[in-house]
Amino acid sequence: MTEKRKFERIKDGAKVIYKVMGVKGEYPLEAIDMGAGGFRLPLYEKVPPGTLLELHISLSKDNEPFFGLAKVAWQDSRLKKDKKNIPCYETGVEVIKVGIENRKRIVKHIRTHISGFGHSEI
């Protein structure tokens, strides 16, 4: 099977608060994995591909959280359990707006982990 991703990914506990655009309610969670182009998140609700999400992102070892806009690319229809044993749907989101400086922060964070200075695996 050929890898289709444009960006390297790491398993990381980046903290994310997500909100479905135009809907009340914000939900904190930890990313399952991440790349410069997106995240795999354990969402607590079903959302169709194309749904826009507002994200508040906190990278581990980074004291300055930032905001982003993401689009749901896919969602697993099977319920799984997150790290806290809460039922969730693994969901791939594409970051579509985060700002160039914040995108650079994500890339630097990933490269730091890949080069062996972090605790995460690829």
Image: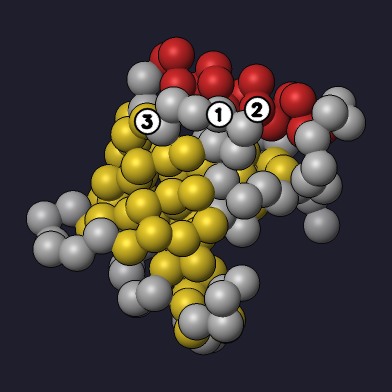
Which of discs 2 and 1 lies nearer the camera? The answer is: 1
The Cα–Cα distance between marks 2 and 3, rounded to whole angstroms, is 14 Å
Residue situated in front as seen by the camera: 115 or 2: 115
Amino acid bearing label 1: Asp
Amino acid bearing label 3: Phe
Q: Residue at x 36, y 20 (%)?
A: 99
Disc 1 element:
loop
- Left or right placement of residue 110 versus residue 122 in this view: left
Q: Residue furthest top?
A: 101
Question: Which residue position is annotated with label 3?
Answer: 66
Disc 2 element:
helix
Are circles 2 and 1 on residues that touch, CB within 8 Å? yes
Query: Height in image: 7 above or below 32?
Result: above
Between disc 2 and disc 3, whose residue precedes?
3
Question: Which residue position is annotated with label 2?
Answer: 109
Disc 3 element:
strand
Q: Is residue 50 visible?
A: no
- Residue 4 in which image quadrant: top right
Residue 3 location in percent, x, y? 75, 47
- Left or right placement of residue 89 versus residue 12 in this view: left
Residue 72 location in percent, x, y? 38, 55
Q: Is residue 113 visible?
A: yes
Amino acid bearing label 2: His
- Left or right placement of residue 99 versus residue 91 in this view: left
Which of discs 3 and 1 lies nearer the camera? The answer is: 1
Query: Height in image: 47 above or below 115?
Result: below
Question: Which residue position is annotated with label 1?
Answer: 62
- Left or right placement of residue 92 versus residue 11 in this view: left
